[in-house]
Amino acid sequence: MSDESYPRPDAQVHFGVFLQGVNHGTVWSDPASGSQIDFQTFQKVAQTAERGLFDAFFLGEGLRLREQLGRIHDLDVVGRPDAITQLAALGAVTSRIGLAATQNVTYNDPADLARRLASLDVLSGGRAAWNIVTTDNAWTGANFRRGGWLDHADRYRRAADFVTTAQAIWDGAPSSPTAPADPVHRLGPTLDVTVVPTVPRSPQQHPVLFQAGDSPAGRDFAAQYAEVIFSAHGSDLDDALAFAQDVRARTVAAGRPADDLKILPGTQFVLADTPAEAVEKGRWVKEQQVTPATALSLLGQIWGEDLSGYDPDGPLPTHDPVIETVGETRGAARHGADPRTIAAQWRERAETEHLTIRQLVIAQERQRGFVGTPASVAEQLIRFVRSGASDGFNITPWIVPGGLDDIVDQLVPELQERGAYRTEYTGSTLREHLGLRPPRTRRHQDSERSGVPD
């Protein structure tokens, strides 16, 4: 397909980097793997991404060590610093790249969080973003006085209340450091807040709003409030197109232009000089990602019990899963499917192909992202973006802190040669990098004053 035949023949590829924290996509055991808590790790990744003209450096966040079946998860990181604190420090050693903090609406307070995000936005010159997340587990709630958790629908009701309150606080910000602001009062189904804003607006007016929604409620929430949606639909083109069409239709139904919501799916790149080397490297990375402990942990999510006493190089359990007990550490391993059905399918495959527990888990793990030469991967990314399947990609490096080096040094130049990637930053704010309009609430206020629809 020629560039002229694409629906968006001039669209540019946008990159962000996602430092996820706890996950089995990062190879922790390699000698080149750095600390997950040292500032030098975050600085190296952020500065490499800025050298590669990325839009944003995106941090995951965890409010408590993760648990599985009531026990601390052995693969979690102790001592991970607060995301906003990390990003404030990174703002001092970078000058252009956006700084995106994952922050939870279930257990934070809107007046406090709005102030901290606005502070990051002002101090960085308009580079802050907020990845809006909710939490559904009781073990995180146990760190907070109110404890417990919220049902899925209630989480999104609180999220809507929280976000509109934060937007009202930002809209009510003082016009200058010496101008007093009026109190902002918000009364909603889950919140009753009165606050006097104290932080002035940054050059981009509001922090950019990210959200990772995939359920129908999550997609609707993104269509209503988010400016960037971070999705899991970043490997298969048809799947990505279907997702993009759906969220853009929801965005229009929410009264916004279809392109008001940018789509940056999460992905991974494995690059090598030849196709054969790339395939072999991709196989090796996949094997390193699924350690023996990880294999037993993932299998335990299906069986609903602690399988740490099993030999990862031995056979699967012969008994059926414990359906009554579900303890998930990362995402929904069962995805609503009957665990007995999954177990039967996995045992059949293991017996047919003579696979151990770890070999089976590796075989069941789908290849995420893109594997190939820099030139071939560049062509695939251009196809995604110019066909409308996404606006770019949020990259999780398979190793840190050096996992962006070949992307910046080899893949970015290939995209630039094809006219599909910026050759310099043309703005100073994250909103400018992403090509976003002013915040929707500000546009609405301006349209009310002018009489021109936003």
Image (tube, grey):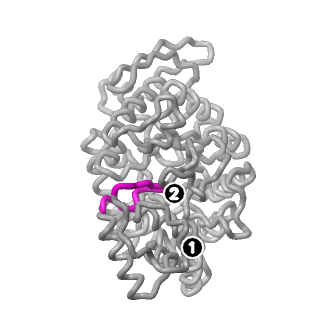
Viewer-proximal residue among 5 and 24: 24
Q: Is residue 419 visible?
A: no
Q: Residue at 58% x, 45% y: name it.
A: 98
How many numbered marks appear? 2
Q: Residue at 32% x, 26% y: name it.
A: 189
State the extent of the magenta-drawn residues as a range: 324-337
Viewer-proximal residue among 290 and 133: 290
Give residue 270's mark. Answer: 1
Q: Is residue 358 visible?
A: yes
Q: Three-letter amino acid code at disc 2?
A: Asn
Q: Quadrant of the C terminus?
A: top left
Residue 413 vs 144, above or below: the answer is: below
Residue 72 vs 235, above or below: the answer is: above
Element type at mark 1: strand
Quick check: is 331 in the magenta stretch? yes
410 left or right of 234 in image: right
Viewer-proximal residue among 354 and 409: 354
x, y percentage for residue 445? 37, 25
Q: Three-letter amino acid code at disc 1?
A: Val
